[in-house]
Amino acid sequence: MNARPVKISAVGTHVPERVVTNDDLSRTLDTSDEWISSRSGIRERRIAAEGEAASDLGAVAASRALEAAAVRPADLDLIIVASLSPDMLFPSTASFISGKIGADGTPAFDLSAACTGFIYALATGASFVASGQAEKVLVIGAEVVSKMIDWTDRGTAVLFGDGAGAVLLEPAESEDEAIVGFDLGNDPAGVELLNLPAGGSRNPASPETLATGQHFIKMNGSEVFKFATRVIVKSGREVLARHGRRIEDVDLFIPHQANIRIIDAAARKLGVPPERVFSNLERYGNTSCASIPLCLDEAAAAGRIAGGELVLMVGFGAGLTWGSCLARMGELKRIQE
Ligand code: ACO
């Protein structure tokens, strides 16, 4: 797909300090560590402090990615932020982040594709670099989903967490360290299955929307579960077939971290052996657009991305949307702790 090859050259992440365990949740909700860990694989998540917004986490992740790459904020050509928990409906969280990191004057915008947002943003940023419209693009997934959750709804409260991850996209020296391709999709029949009903122009804020909890995430968990397992397999196969690769060629499979049962079922159907699947869901829960960059960073830290690996990333989320990115990784720069 590339007019010129594009690489993911650096990564930076940031999560809030506060750890909330399943036992913590079971003190206020009718739930248990046993239920949450056996049904989802989640044991704990990070929760932002009062007053901490998506741009606060995203800016730290962004600065870390830039520091790792030794790139100055002023050298960026574009900033794209994917988030379902933006600071405000407008201006964009990208605008807030550009101010915080000192990238004044750099074009910056948000992209909305729910939990698939990071893959959509990666595809958009890569197109700018591939076409020569940009040399350096920062793609950020930044989420404070905890502020969009009804903490009395056990069906959603136990699943999500907060965090941010950023990657830098630059022209690659060769195809040996470049993004191979993408598969993106959307099924609008699923808009009712996962959404935040009020606060937009369809259902503006009113005393009634407040009283009926319409400003919180609503989800049909079992339908989203079925969709997710089906679409990860379909999209993963699609991107591999489109670029003449087989599942055996994939060194590392990084799916969106929503539920370990979804990940295991999809990996099994795809034919990815467990040792090639990356998951950190246990410690972060579903961090939406931040989940894949958080995995990229930890995979690099663990030596599982050292250069040369073929990585398959697959996201899914509200829309219902899905997206896959197949990438041959070079060195993924990150700040050593
Ligand atoms: N603690 C204890 N019991 C619970 C909890 C809880 N936290 N939540 C639900 N239950 C109960 C239900 O009420 C139900 O009880 P009942 O049988 O008496 O009615 C029972 O547990 C089983 O509920 P199910 O919904 O059938 O449980 P399931 O095994 O499907 O797991 C879950 C639910 C974890 C939500 C699962 O469906 C799931 O992970 N779905 C996908 C969610 C997802 O990926 N969302 C993110 C998409 S990405 C984005 O864009 C944001």
Image: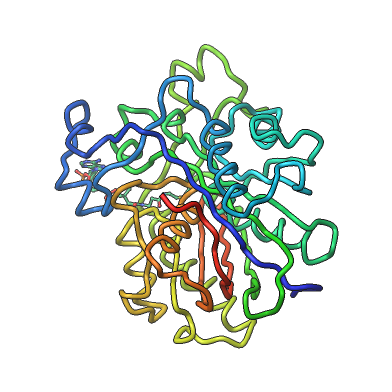
Vertical order, 298 against 212 (above or below): below
Left or right placement of residue 100 versus residue 162 in this view: right
* Of the pair 288 and 127, the residue shown nearer to us: 127
Q: Nearer the viewer, residue 206 or 300?
A: 300
Of 219 and 131, the residue lying toward us: 131
User: Residue at the spot x=58%, y=62% of the render?
Assistant: 323
Q: Residue at x 37, y 70 (%)?
A: 277
Tally of marks: 0
Whether residue 41 can be seen here = yes
Picture coordinates of residue 335, whole percent (x, y): 49, 51
Left or right: 156 in relation to 13: left
In the rendered image of this protein, does residue 132 appear above or below residue 174?
above
Q: x, y percentage for residue 130?
A: 78, 66
Q: Quadrant of the N terminus?
A: bottom right
Q: Is residue 289 visible?
A: no
152 on left or right of 141: left
| Point 73% across, 73% down: residue | 5
Q: Residue 273 location, x and y as percent?
A: 33, 79
Residue at the (69%, 35%) spot, across then down: 98
